[in-house]
Image (cartoon, helix red, strand yellow):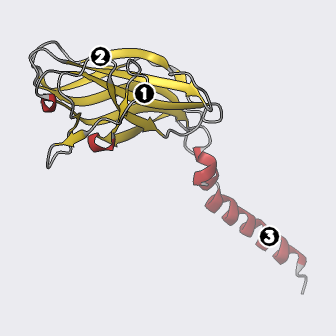
Amino acid sequence: MNRKPFFFISLIALSALVLSASGPALVSPAAASALTGYYNLFGHEGIGTVGASLVAGQTPPVGDYVPNGCRYINVPNATYGQYYLRYPLHLPNGVTITTVSAFVADFNLTGTMYVHMMSRPWNSRQAGTDFAGSIGTSSGAGGDQTISRTGITTVVNNETTEYWIDVLPVNSANPGEMCVYGIQVTYTYNGAFLPLIQR
């Protein structure tokens, strides 16, 4: 019996079966050019620290509202730059910061809370640089507010630079009238490598 034609036909049939089964799996969906991520901090993660106008001194006391964890600097009649709530940022290297939002409460008739987005080279004695300017709560008792800075294009370089958010209260006799519920940093990153991971 001549087995060559049978072997040849079997080989062709097997090849067609493999190609038909594996063909669609080789096609990966197109990856988004950029993906969006969010870095969130609870209000009670804020660290009370001395501000630039005092240069040095004792760490200020902080207070928290229960159960929402809204944190405030517990020092009455604080002026601009005396005390900060500091929120360190631990963002992935290479991402682009696009928006910073602060979720706050401001029930003080005369006070304002300011949010500064800061960076500085590692091992530096610099006070830090505002990489996106500052934003503040509305004048008067505005209640619960979301204040945001959009259009930021800062690219994170963790090898050379540290990043953080400072919240500065300018309050009156009742410091608990202004507090921070949380901070959110929106960033984008390149998603072109995801199809390779999904395979």
Residue 127 lies, in percent from the top left, at 50, 22
Residue 75 lies, in percent from the top left, at 21, 30
Residue 11's mark? 3
Count of marks overlaid on the render: 3
- Foreground residue among 179 and 8: 179
Residue 80's mark? 2
Dot 2: within a 10 Å radius of its alpha carbon, few (fewer than 14), some, or many (20 or more) residues? some
| Residue drawn at point x = 38 percent, y = 33 percent | 86
- Foreground residue among 68 and 101: 68
Residue 158 lies, in percent from the top left, at 60, 35
Quarter-of-image position of residue 17: bottom right
- Give the CA distance from mark 3 to mark 2: 81 Å
- Foreground residue among 62 and 198: 62
Q: Earlier in the sequence, mark 2 or mark 1?
A: 1
Residue 56's mark? 1
| Residue drawn at point x = 84 percent, y = 76 percent | 7
- Give the CA distance from mark 2 to mark 1: 15 Å
Q: Secondary structure under badge 3?
A: helix
| Closer mark to the observer between disc 3 and disc 1 | 1
Q: Secondary structure under badge 2?
A: loop
